[in-house]
Amino acid sequence: MQGLFDRYGRQHTYLRVSITDRCNFRCTYCMPADGIECQPKENLLSFEEIESLVRFFVRHGIRKVRLTGGEPTVRRNYLELVERLTQIEGLPEVAITTNGSLLALDAERLHRMGVTGINVSLDTLDATRFEKITRRDKFSLVWNGIQEALRVGLRLKVNCVVVPGVNDDEILDFVELARSQPLTVRFIEFMPFLDNSWNISGVVSSSEIREKIGDIYPLFSVKSDPGQVASTYQIPGFRGDIEFVSSVTESFCGDCNRLRLTADGLVKSCLFLPTEISLRDLVRGGAGEAELLSAVQNCLDGKWKEHPPMTKWTQLDQLTMVQIGG
Ligand code: SAM
Ligand code: SF4
């Protein structure tokens, strides 16, 4: 069988590539306010190394790449990397997850390069609250970025991590965004990572959110593509749709098709599985196709059928979201 398969017969066609562990925001659910140690530049994969690894993965069946981080747009000249990747033959989808701080400036170029989707994190529609959550006074910048992305015609998802007492009173306001705009609002359950003070009581479950929305709007489930982590819903008359990412309460490991590459070149088969396999070291040591493939296969062979229950997560991989790559 050709392609990247794990022991459970799942083919991996989606690669999430973190291109930096740095960020210009400090979202409370993601990073501590300070004290984060970033990797020295020489530890990071260069653009040449990323491109060459992506080409390798595409030869082995990867069909979608998402750039993430940290904040991918803070990596110097990131547009150059995006351009390189969008030109790779056999890779129909190149997407980016961003905090939106550079979107007002870059949306048009990203669209012209052929970027197929942008996910923007936005957890509140209130500027004061935004500053509390992100520890940065940048609401207008992000909001303008979202408007610009829509104006140029980028496919857009708004990622909203719902935390009780922080933004759970804004759920319906977020739903309203999808009424007149062709965007997807995605409600994400709060997940545990190193130093983010996670507690099960800090999780607003997707079913609670669905119920709250369902009390006001007729929500209809629509079929999602295999490998999708989100369940998708529509509301009649709305231009956009609503999605739920229930990482904590509803496992979606069943048809997982994802691999991850950290900014320093580790390959990961699951957000919550530690890894020792450095593709960066292999590439820098002159490894050929077979050696790389065997390393990736090795990583895939260690992939579990599904991640353990959330109460055990904090003991698994003591890394922050930005060190792993969100
Ligand atoms: N900086 C970019 C951004 O904010 O979109 C990309 C990286 S960020 C780590 C990727 C996604 O992870 C964002 O949508 C963010 O909201 C989400 N995220 C971060 N920490 C999380 C947590 N503890 N639980 C759930 N989602 C989280
Ligand atoms: Fe930065 Fe994104 Fe994490 Fe916020 S969620 S701190 S923007 S990496």
Image (cartoon, grey):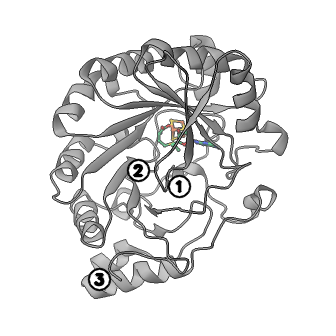
The answer to whether residue 68 is visible is: yes
For marks 1 and 2 on the same chain, the one whose residue lies earlier in the sequence: 2
For marks 1 and 3 on the same chain, the one whose residue lies earlier in the sequence: 3
Residue farthest right in this picture:
201
- Measure the C-alpha gap from mark 1 to mark 3: 23 Å
The verdict on label 3 being within 8 Å of ligand 1 is: no
Asked whether disc 1 touches disc 2, contact meaning CB atoms under 8 Å apart, the reply is: no
- Quarter of the view holding residue 200: top right
For marks 3 and 2 on the same chain, the one whose residue lies earlier in the sequence: 2
Image position, residue 313 (x, y; %): 73, 60
User: What is the crowding at mark 3: few (fewer than 14 residues within 10 Å), some, or many (at least 20)?
Assistant: few
Q: Kindly identify the residue that appears in the image at 67 percent across and 55 percent down.
A: 251
Which element carries disc 3, helix, strand or loop?
loop
Q: Kindly identify the residue that appears in the image at 60 percent across and 61 percent down.
A: 253
Image position, residue 201 (x, y; %): 84, 39
| Figure label count | 3
Q: Amino acid at mark 2?
A: Thr
> 254 or 322, which is in the foreground?
254
Q: Amino acid at mark 1?
A: Gln
State the quadrant of the N terminus. bottom left
- Quarter of the view holding residue 114: top left
Residue indicated by mark 1: 323
Give me the disc on residue 285: 3
In the visual, does 248 lie left or right of 153? right
Give me the disc on residue 20: 2
